[in-house]
Amino acid sequence: MSDLLTTASLVAIVASGIRLSVPLLLAGLGETFGQRSGVLNLGVDGVMLLGAFGGYYTTLKTQNVWLGLLVGLGIGLVFGLLYGFISVTLRAEQGISGIGVYLFGLGVSDLLFQKLVGTPLPIPSFPELAIPGVSSLPVLGPMLFEHSIVVYVAFALVPVAVIVLNKTTFGLNIRAVGETPEAADSLGVSVGRVRYATTIIGGAMAGAAGAVLTIELSIFQQNLTNAQGFIAIALVYFGAWRPIGVMLGALLFGLLNALVLQMKTLGIIPPDASNLAAMAPAIITILALVIVANRFRAPTALTKPFVRGT
Amino acid sequence: MDRNTQKGNTMRNIRTFRYLLLIAVMALIGAACGDSGDDGGGDGGGDADGIRIAIVGPSASNDLAFTQSIVEGVNRLDGVSEAAITDGTFVVEDAATAIRNYADEGYDLVLAHGSQYGGSLQEIAPDFPDTQFAWGTAADTFGLANVSAYEAASDQGGYVMGVMAAGLTESGTIGVVGPIEVGDAKLYVDGFVNGAKATDPGVTVTVNYIDSFSDVALASEAAESLLSVGADVLTGTAQMTVGAIGVANENGVAWFGTQSNQSSVAPDIVVANQVYKWEVVLQDLVDAVAAGDLTSEVYEINFENGGLVIEYNDGYDLADDLVDAANAAIDGLKDGSITTGA
Amino acid sequence: MLAKTAIPIAAVIGALVVGLLAIAALGADPVRALEALVQGSLGSRDALIETVLKATPLLLVGAGITVAFRTSVINIGGEGQMVAGGLLSTSTALVVPDLPAWILLPLVLAMGLVGGAVWGGLAGYLKAFWGVNEILSTIMLNIVAVQLMNYLLRGPLIDPGEIERGTRIPQTKRLPEAADLPLLFGDDRLHSGPLIAVAAAIFAYILLWRTTFGLRLRAVGLSQESAKYAGVNVRWSITSALAISGALAGLAGAVLVFGAESHRMVTDGSTAGFTGNAGFNGIVAALFGGLHPLWTIPASFLFGALLVGGNSLQRAVQVPSALILALNGLVVLTVVSTDLVRRRLAAGTDDAHEAAELVSAQAEDTS
């Protein structure tokens, strides 16, 4: 156990936890926008997979990671738009249509990968950026400030999301539409337009999350996300629809996974029991929510399509 | 629209489905009339062009790992007229269906390439007494006359890799990324650990089983975790290790591959690969099938019969004395003076 | 009206057309593909049996899904619940292998129900009493279930022969024959699982539409507030809806184990290796059946046929069966986009109707 508490080990756990949390954070932040406006997209994982494949394939062909990220984001944006059409214009049942998106993304990304690429060839990953000054700090430097650029960007998006949601007219409209769409509508806010905007943001972020995942790993594989999109949705509930809460949830989940991995590496968890340890992040996430759940409540209009005059 | 109309809709929908079903049943009858049915399995011998082989594999046939090894092996066989592949069959029950269908379609040799398929094969094979089956990696023929098993002495390759890794490490720590501690993966890892330990009892070999065959992100972080405890040589097995190879590549850490040649994935850091040459043992089976014989044997590919080979990466500058050490280990494993202990 | 009833069929046909175009774009022969799809799923007695067997877990999960969704509970934990049911029934068969078939078989099936009910009910309890959203808990419980499965199949439940031979394949030994699902005709693979699934669908139908309990569930599904006002115990309803939904998924897990070719529980280390994704595809079938348990029967058959046909399509023209998954997604999107528009149009009057029913039922109850 003492091995676990060495500086090197703690640095490794935190740095690894942060890396693991980034795709969850990106997808979760996007989904937060959607849910705050009253739209649940259960298809995040499918959009992530499509964005991941798009990002992978583009990077493979051009060797340009930023182009890859852009394509992933673009694919996500398109599917966000599509999901907006389905859930806002056609008012489809959200819990179910998202599963359609998921299955579609899972199938298409696998199909295209097998047909267009086949063998998992490596692609370049994002450049790392040691932040001048702070990265030379002992312990904290290597823990927090020697990551790839997208890691900083992802975390920088958290305050951006807080500000957009709480301090802008757009954010006010989002919250209004998610809580009392009738009132928002009567005040002249276009419920549909706001919800389209948030599903597009959610889709784009999910696509970007997938692209970040594949580029950070330098590889693509069938079902690369391994249900991370679903975990991201769960973390939106965990984070009580607040960007900071989502970030804390993503970090908790990432850090727990990293902790378990490090404990396996150090032999603290023997192979016989490793499956039991691998359950821990999921169980602790549930327990953590049990503790805080009753203090927060979901946006009132979540999953409820808006029909004027009802 | 009131509730009754809605119910009416439902009823009408069900009726539409009934029509569809009726059409399906009619199509079925038509098909049954037109089709003379199966011929009850292979005729026990190949025709002039060679025999027909079917492969059922759990992952993609170009996965750089387990399934690719059997596909490449079959492609190198003589006397085969057709090789059909169903890959990506990770659902065990779907694999069982595919195995049954291939037997039904008269393939002469059906390869169930996944140790998790054995239980199903045990039930299917007796229904097709004239069809030759083989499955792996496994060591059990269930006492059935038409079932052979094949396995890889992957602990041998692991052992040799371990010998080289122990010579290569400067930090004295070697890392292993494993999937779930089962089957072929466990065999390889155990052999690797013992090979490294036998070469230099002072080295630490740290094994991290991530408890998943599919979580690439976790495999990647497991590799990072191993690096954090000072590992400067890595290996790993199963299809999710592509994530770990990426980490090794980024950090310029030596990598040992297994099951297939992974040099193309990371040309700078892959030292050597243990490659399976299934054709070495399968050729016997194919020849027997062509001669009209059924075989119930356990085959093993190993260094001695040439079914296991170490393929070095030309792009990696490996010291001669380590190649010598590896060759010495291979010789020892061949003549039995060394055992892997796995 | 007619146009609307044709929508689900049109959705499937539309998706098929898209699929065939995709096949052509991928350089394979769409005519051969279609032939393989139909022939492989419906074209012979064996193919039809395969389809029915594939449809069985879809129907069981789907019937459960109708109960959950009608109570407005989103159960995406079918995968974990199937595993839980499979594990508990398997363990039971290993612990008391010598019981006669007439006790053992019902016992293991019941244990499948129990295992799934616990796994689903846990999520229901957490939602109802602790405010833990069921999407979060069912996803997390899926993760827990797969690790539990790997732990048990690698350790306590492993076939002793696997340790002896050193092969260590994560599977149980062959389970007692007394627990095999009886074959219907004896000369092929058709076991009694499909009958169990149809019975479960009928059960779900009766439960939802012919009992006061079911009425309460649906009342909760329509509006928790008015249900509470009418005296329905909302928390208990939510817990039991997820427990019932989980129980049927757990039964699907048991049917998969005791109806499997190998007559044992075996994994490749993933949930889908055992469930074949039925936990998700069952949702698709239930949706396609308009969240009506009886209509889910033909819907499951259709999706079973698509999945089986997809595998044979892969064999025939070497197009990955992932295509079928994508088409399933497309079907869901089309159906949900159109069918639900129709439902929404009716929603206003529907709600009023249901509420009236509920109030009168409550009155009967108290009188």
Image (tube, grey):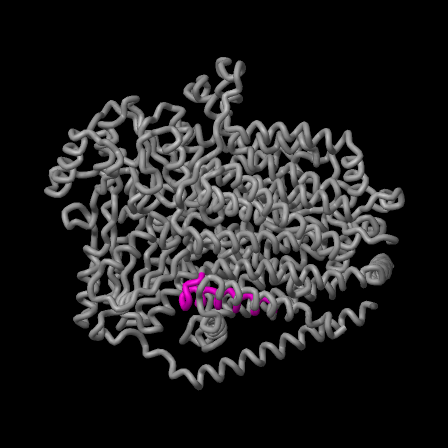
Magenta: predominant secondary structure element? helix
Is residue A143 shown in magenta? no
Q: Position of residue C106 (x, y in %)?
A: 52, 62
Task: Say which residue appears at 36% left-offset and 65% top-offset.
Answer: B99
Taking the spot 53% from the left edge, 40% from the top edge, the residue there is: A67
Tell me which segment is drawn in magenta.
C299-319
Q: Is residue C93 above or below residue A277?
A: below
Residue A212 shows in the view: yes
Quadrant where the image shows the N terminus of chain A: top left
Toward the viewer: B23 or C220?
B23
Decide whether residue C315 is among the magenta residues.
Answer: yes
Furthest toward the front, the residue is: A62
Q: Nearer the viewer, residue B72 or B11?
A: B72
- The residue drawn where x is 72% and y is 54% is C71
x and y, in percent, of residue A266 in the image:
39, 26
Residue A195 pos. (x, y %): 74, 46
**Residue B90: image location, x then y, percent:** 42, 55
Numbered disc total: 0
Residue C179 visible within the image: no
Asked which quadrant contains residue B155, the reply is top left
